[in-house]
Image (cartoon, rainbow, N blue to C red):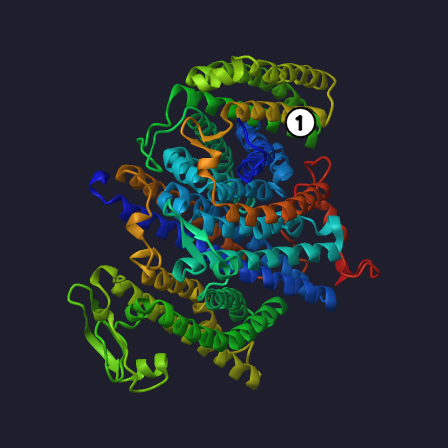
């Protein structure tokens, strides 16, 4: 059924990769913002902020690549999905504005610092909820007619999209908590361990609920997961989730430093793979496949040259920036 | 209430509003990143502490401006889809790759090295740190390259074909990227960014010199800024003239709107200095004109005939009053900046550059002039392209998303509210930083980091110098 590896498939993987790198990188710093209200002490907040301040901007650039890449490689999908997700997208953008400027603003004022802390936490939460809701809205499918979105401006709001919104919020919070385990020490780190436990259980519940609800959205999803012989191909995913969960619990129990964060990322990767299995080869579920949405070959090829040459370079110097700011962030060495 | 409004008008208002807020920050950070690279290079070359102080002083301001540019820029990159989905579908194969290359070659470069530039001097040492500063500065210029290529293609489309789905597809990438108006627009905009920054730096220097003419930091920055204004302003006027001639060749209706030429002139068109363009009546009321000068500027001949908007179908007219006035604001400010440059050269020659109060007051009032000129210039070129998004090919009304007015109206209100709160606060913080003068031992954004107490030196061999001088 599936033809040889073609450009559209390659690009589907490129976009999926960009979105995943975004989720990996911005996930923990958004999660950090969501956890902000649980750490009221100024010293703790300074450390939390400092642990991501040098890298947050690079993290968000992957979101721009995801959006820009989608417009370039699958313009029809971009043109249909963005109006369909209008309200969550605008909410996400506004959330990102608030939390992005808070990185700079909270150091420039003592009187209004608390207000920018609220902006940081609120913006992070709003952006995360919006992303999760958008994911759910995409999965449940949108109404397309004549190459255009043909639904209303509240179609995205359903119990399922709210569920995915909450699920993503829990997931990012887990990434944030395990990131704190990696980057901090002392009481702050102990609290992060404790939070990681709660959030891990919440995350498992969220994964289970979304996994159970998804096949009820469309017969295609159910067939993808529960028919022979697909079932053989997809069963490793839930088994791997169980195995990674066990490892993650052990690393938390042993108070390990970097492993909880890495394993949380693996858990994300598995959930993400599950989403990919459900959606492929649709880019707008149930209506537009990656081949129907694909830009002409010469556009996709022109960009692929850039992606192949530049993304390894980008990963290289991004890695270098993380390396420069490696190690624990200490309260005394606040960067501002 | 909102449902009575035209959703396309609301979408245009939203794009214009968010774009106008956004453009101010890149216009400033393109220039400031280059200035920071110059300051750091000069510090490393001369070892003079004043350059490091200035570097740290402007770095703190850069951090805030850049942050605001990033967050308002993400909004722009998604609005093509949320509000202009028909445009995104039709032009995605052409415009999309240009923007994807902007992300890959520019945004990542800036963002990847920004952290080291802001906070990493102690961790990586001056040499690697300078590389990071340079990468950020180069990134801002590469970003300008791609986004202006994309914008220019919308003004003067080339190298394209149209497929069966009605999408623009690429026939020749080089013709798309280097489309006819691109080199002019790129030069004009980069020079504008440099001038904008030099005016801001000059105004801050002037502000502190007015209070104390002996401060080393303000003297250095004021002198550097005035050199920049004096040298670049005349070049910019020439570049603008060439850009205008290019527009006359490819988008004549835009030039007619800029000039207020509703009527054709068969033997020499007048230059309308001021007047009130009346779009309905199709003429400029109360016009103050200089005979034949427009033909001289545009055609280099006093009697050359110039067609007017009466040769263009009415449904293809740009909104003349806006284009006409914004063009005049830009040109007037351009000549004022040129005047400031000349004044500074005169004062420099007489040896009163740091003592001339009139010069300092002039420079201080010209601080925001670059921003206003940039906005006026963009309003001219964007409204002059109307009623098309892709000039002559795709009308603006056919480019919008199928959204109801209440959706766009609410988001527009939300953006207005949020931007005024957030960016007003940012501007206040920037002005507060500018209000204190750069001092001895100025710290960067990494401010009171205890590890900095040892100081740093440009050359590793002269340990201790940094903390002493």
| Residue A91 at x, y percent in the picture | 41, 35
| Residue B141 at x, y percent in the picture | 56, 60
Q: Is residue A282 left or right of residue A303?
A: left
Toward the viewer: A336 or A52? A52
Disc 1 is attached to a residue of which chain? A
**Residue A159 is drawn in which quadrant?**
top left
Look at the image and tell me in which quarter the N terminus of chain B lies: top left
Look at the image and tell me in which quarter the C terminus of chain B lies: bottom right
Q: Is residue B130 left or right of residue B1?
A: right
- When the figure is inspected, residue A307 is found, relative to residue B204, above or below; the finding is above
- Could one spot residue B439 in this view of the protein? no
Toward the viewer: B31 or A19? A19
Query: For the point 43% across and 39% down, which residue is it?
Result: A78
Which residue is labeled 1 in the image?
Answer: A261
Q: Pick out the residue farthest to the left.
A: B281
Query: For the point 34% across and 68% down, which residue is it?
Result: B327
| Residue A26 at x, y percent in the picture | 57, 35
- When the figure is inspected, residue B385 is found, relative to residue A257, above or below; the finding is below
Query: For the point 34% across and 86% down, which residue is it?
Result: B301
Q: How many marks?
A: 1
- When the figure is inspected, residue B195 is found, relative to residue B267, above or below; the finding is above
| Residue B20 at x, y percent in the picture | 39, 55
Q: Pick out the residue farthest to the right.
A: B461
- Could one spot residue A30 in this view of the protein? yes
**Residue A11 is drawn in which quadrant?**
top right
Query: For the point 53% across and 65% down, which residue is it?
Result: B201
Toward the viewer: B452 or A216? A216
Toward the viewer: B39 or B468? B39
């Amino acid at each position: 059924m599936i033809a040889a590896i073609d450009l559209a498939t390659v690009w589907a993987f490129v976009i999926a990769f960009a979105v995943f790198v975004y989720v990996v990188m911005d996930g923990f710093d958004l999660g950090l913002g969501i956890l902000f209200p649980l750490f009221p002490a100024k010293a703790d907040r300074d450390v939390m902020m400092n642990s991501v301040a040098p890298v947050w901007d690079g993290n968000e650039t992957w979101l721009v690549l995801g959006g820009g890449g989608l417009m370039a490689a699958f313009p029809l999908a971009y043109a249909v999905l963005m109006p369909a997700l209008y309200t969550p997208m605008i909410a996400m953008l506004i959330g990102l504005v608030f939390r992005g400027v808070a990185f700079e603003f909270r150091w420039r004022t003592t009187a209004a610092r608390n207000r920018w802390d609220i902006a940081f936490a609120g913006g992070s939460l709003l952006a995360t909820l919006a992303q999760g809701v958008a994911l759910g809205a995409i999965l449940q499918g949108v109404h397309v007619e004549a190459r255009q979105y043909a639904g209303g401006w509240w179609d995205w709001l359903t119990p399922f999209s709210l569920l995915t919104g909450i699920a993503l919020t829990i997931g990012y919070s887990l990434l944030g908590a395990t990131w704190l385990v990696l980057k901090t020490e002392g009481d702050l780190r102990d609290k992060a361990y404790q939070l990681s436990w709660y959030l891990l259980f919440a995350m498992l519940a969220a994964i289970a609920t979304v996994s159970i609800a998804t096949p009820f959205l469309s017969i295609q999803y159910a067939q993808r997961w529960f028919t022979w012989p697909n079932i053989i191909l997809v069963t490793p995913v839930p088994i791997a989730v169980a195995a990674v969960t066990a490892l993650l619990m052990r690393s938390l129990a042993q108070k390990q430093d970097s492993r909880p964060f890495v394993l949380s990322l693996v858990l994300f990767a598995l959930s993400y793979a599950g989403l990919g299995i459900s959606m492929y080869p649709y880019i707008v579920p149930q209506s537009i496949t990656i081949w129907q949405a694909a830009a002409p070959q010469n556009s996709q090829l022109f960009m692929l040259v850039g992606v192949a040459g530049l993304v390894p370079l980008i990963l290289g110097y991004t890695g270098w920036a993380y390396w420069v700011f490696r190690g624990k962030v200490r309260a005394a060495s606040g960067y501002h | 209430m909102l449902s009575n409004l035209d959703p396309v008008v609301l979408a245009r208002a939203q794009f214009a509003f968010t774009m106008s807020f956004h453009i101010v920050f890149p216009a400033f950070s393109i220039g400031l990143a280059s200035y920071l690279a110059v300051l750091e290079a000069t510090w490393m070359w001369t070892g003079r502490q004043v350059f490091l102080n200035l570097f740290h002083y402007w770095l703190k301001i850069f951090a805030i401006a850049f942050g605001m540019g990033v967050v308002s820029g993400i909004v722009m990159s998604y609005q093509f889809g949320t509000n202009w989905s028909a445009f995104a579908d039709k032009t995605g194969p052409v415009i999309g790759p240009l923007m994807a290359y902007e992300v890959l070659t520019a945004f990542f470069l800036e963002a990847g090295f920004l952290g080291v530039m802001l906070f990493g001097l102690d961790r990586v040492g001056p040499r690697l740190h300078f590389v990071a500063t340079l990468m950020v500065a180069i990134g801002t210029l590469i970003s300008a390259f791609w986004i202006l290529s994309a914008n220019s293609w919308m003004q003067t489309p080339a190298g394209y074909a149209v497929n069966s789905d009605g999408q623009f597809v690429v026939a020749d990438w080089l013709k798309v990227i280097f489309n006819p108006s691109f080199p002019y627009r790129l030069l004009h905009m980069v020079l504008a960014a440099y001038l904008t920054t030099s005016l801001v730096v000059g105004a801050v220097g002037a502000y502190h010199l007015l209070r104390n003419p002996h401060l080393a930091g303000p003297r250095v920055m004021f002198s550097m800024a005035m050199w920049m204004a004096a040298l670049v302003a005349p070049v910019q006027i020439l570049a603008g003239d060439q850009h205008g001639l290019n527009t006359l060749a490819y988008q004549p209706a835009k030039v007619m709107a800029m000039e207020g030429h509703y009527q054709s002139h068969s033997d020499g068109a007048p230059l309308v200095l001021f007047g009130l363009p009346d779009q309905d009546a199709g003429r400029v009321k109360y016009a103050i004109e200089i005979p034949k000068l427009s033909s001289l500027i545009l055609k280099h001949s006093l009697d050359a005939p110039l067609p007017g908007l009466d040769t263009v179908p009415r449904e293809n007219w740009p909104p003349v009053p806006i284009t006409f006035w914004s063009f005049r604001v830009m040109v007037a400010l351009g000549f004022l900046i040129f005047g400031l440059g000349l004044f500074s050269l005169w004062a420099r020659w007489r040896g009163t550059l740091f003592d001339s109060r009139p010069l300092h007051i002039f420079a201080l009032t010209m601080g925001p002039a670059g921003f206003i000129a940039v906005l006026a210039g963009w309003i001219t070129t964007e409204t002059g392209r109307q009623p098309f998004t892709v000039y002559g090919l795709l009308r603006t009304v056919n480019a919008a998303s199928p959204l109801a007015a209440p959706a766009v109206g609410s988001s527009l209100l939300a953006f207005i509210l949020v931007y005024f709160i957030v960016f007003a606060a940012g501007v206040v913080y920037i002005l507060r930083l500018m209000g204190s003068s750069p001092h001895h031992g100025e710290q960067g954004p990494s401010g009171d980091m205890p590890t900095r107490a040892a100081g740093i030196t440009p050359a590793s061999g002269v340990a201790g110098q940094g903390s002493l001088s």
